[in-house]
Image: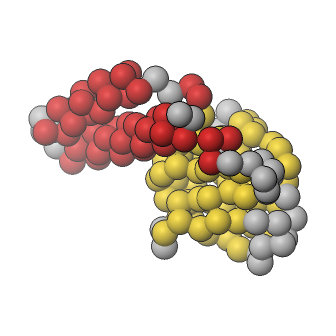
Amino acid sequence: MNFQLVTLLGVKVEADVYEVILPTADGEIAVFPGHEPLVSIAAPGAIAVRHNKADANDKLDFFAISGGVIEVTPTSLKVLVDEADSGDDIVEAESKAALDRALKMKAEAKNQVDLEKASAMVDRHAVRLKVADLRRRHRR
């Protein structure tokens, strides 16, 4: 099936894949070729991509997303998001430091606007850390 991961900057990934595991508002779903048509909200979390049926888990590609929209047809999957970070590009130590800074900002927020900005940053960096951890565990 054709998989497209599209960000505000353009197409991040376009490839023929066997399986994609996605976070949705109702929980994780796995999409395979021939899947029923579906439009859904993508929740913040990790996308896992298996390129070939025989690929082991150590061959999965991971992407951190902060939510978006999913469109599934029997032959394609399109995920539209503001941004997507590849597990290969995430530096775990930097994401941990950024999460710590965001948690401090959230604790010190003086108004609702600052609190919402800090909360969004906490969510973003928590997802990035999750993806970095998934990548590390599966690539051992």
Q: Residue at x 75, y 40 (%)?
A: 13
**Depth order, front residue of 129/125:** 129
Q: Residue furthest bottom?
A: 36
Residue 76 in the image: x percent, y percent?
83, 61
Quarter the N terminus occupies: bottom right
- Horizontally, residue 37 falls left or right of residue 138, namely right
Viewer can see residue 94: yes
Residue 6 in the image: x percent, y percent?
71, 44
- Horizontally, residue 43 falls left or right of residue 120, namely right
**Depth order, front residue of 117/87:** 87
Viewer can see residue 85: no
Q: Residue at x 41, y 27 (%)?
A: 92
Q: Residue at x 21, y 48 (%)?
A: 112
**Depth order, front residue of 129/78:** 129
Q: Residue at x 59, y 59 (%)?
A: 22
Residue 106, quarter of the rendered image:
top left
Residue 7, quarter of the rendered image:
top right
**Image height check: is 18 above or below 30?**
above
Picture colour scheme: secondary structure
**Image height check: is 135 above or below 53?**
above
- Horizontally, residue 80 falls left or right of residue 35, namely left
**Depth order, front residue of 114/101:** 101
**Image height check: is 26 above or below 137?**
below
Count of residue discs: 0
Residue 81 in the image: x percent, y percent?
60, 48
Residue 121 in the image: x percent, y percent?
35, 38
